[in-house]
Amino acid sequence: MSLSVDAVKAALSSVIDPNTGKDLVSSKSAKNIRLDGADVVLDVELGYPAKSQIDPIRKLVVAAVRGVEGAGNVSVNVYSKIIAHAVQRGVKLMPNVKNIIAVASGKGGVGKSTTAVNLALALAAEGAQVGILDADIYGPSQPMMMGINARPESVDGKTMEPLENHGLQVSSIGFMIDPDEPMVWRGPIVTQALQQLLEQTNWRDLDYLVVDMPPGTGDVQLTLSQKVPVTGAVIVTTPQDIALLDARKGLKMFEKVGIPILGIVENMSVHICSNCGHAEPIFGQGGGEKMCADYGVEFLGALPLTMSIREQADSGKPTVVADPDGQVAAIYRSIARKVAIKVAEKAKDMTSKFPSIVIKND
């Protein structure tokens, strides 16, 4: 077989992206294949942030193309392109925010906020522009976890600038109130505050906005699901039966309002003793995976119950930035990649392609 674009394509059809499990041709990742004599030049476009994956994927492509008869030098440009994806019917996308990922749980105390912040940090570590919105109006914890103790500024007196740390843009009601001050607000005021936080923060060109949801299935969750353009939801649970019972309700709520479930994260899966390293499933085991099997959703990963995760979040340097090369950070990064790939597989948002129809009475 002599060197041709078709021969290169045939070689690329055997290259499987290790993250998506799909080959580069059927997934339309391989683009702009050009021949310059015996030299081959091509682009590989990934739909998810992949800073750590670019080099391994490039090596796979180069090895495959070099195997084509007559191929000389192979030049491969691997890059990420994150686009906006479809949301609930009848809800408009936000300007400057491509994809909104809700991180939710049926009940409190399962480590949802810790998961949300580490998920956001892992996406940012892979090269994405990421923001985090603390939607837990009654119990905002992101200011502490993100190590931010400041008030947001307003340039125009109407909108506010997001605060930043660890490469994330952050907005939270916690920046505007005393940490000891309880939020004695009724439901309608809470939902109004959430919408203002979301819409009046000057988010700057976000690929992903991670929303740390309050626990439960009440007013805030309904407002978010009916008025906010959510690309998909991640459910956080522990293996404990009582947590799974509530997580199922959260999952069902998102299904009812047409928000896809991107997957389930099982937190506090196994307790690891900090003295001897003994592992014990103190909250039970296999609950998250069973729930995934029951509902046909993806199991994104399981996190251990370790003191370091708690200490790092409390100190304002969550695990992904405190110990980026550690085993737990690797789990968070794996979960983040799976979430980003699930988002990338969704239908593209086409609303911007449709013309505006204006009816005039002449």
Image: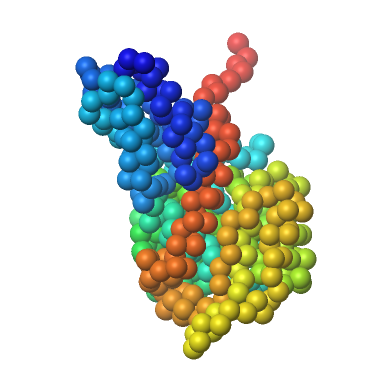
Colour scheme of the rendered structure: rainbow
Q: Is residue 50 above or below residue 43?
A: below
Looking at the image, which residue sits at the far bottom?
A: 275
Quadrant position of the C terminus in the picture: top right
Quadrant position of the N terminus in the picture: top left
Residue 304 percent location from the top left of the image: 56, 72
Residue at image position (32%, 45%) is: 55
Residue at image position (70%, 43%) is: 258
Please count the marks in the image.
0
Q: Is residue 192 above or below residue 81?
A: below
Task: State whether residue 52 appears in this view.
Answer: yes
Residue at image position (51%, 82%) is: 277
Image position of 3 (left or right of 140): left
Looking at the image, which residue sits at the far top?
A: 362
Q: Nearer the viewer, residue 283 or 192?
A: 283
Residue at image position (63%, 55%) is: 299
Image position of 281 (left or right of 85): right
Task: State whether residue 143 appears in this view.
Answer: no
Residue 129 percent location from the top left of the image: 39, 50
Residue 211 percent location from the top left of the image: 55, 57
Q: Is residue 74 above or below residue 275?
A: above
Residue 316 percent location from the top left of the image: 41, 74
Q: Nearer the viewer, residue 1 or 212?
A: 1
Q: Is residue 155 above or below residue 94?
A: below
Image position of 32 (left or right of 101): left
Image position of 195 (left or right of 3): right
Q: Nearer the viewer, residue 156 or 68?
A: 68
Q: Nearer the viewer, residue 194 or 236?
A: 236
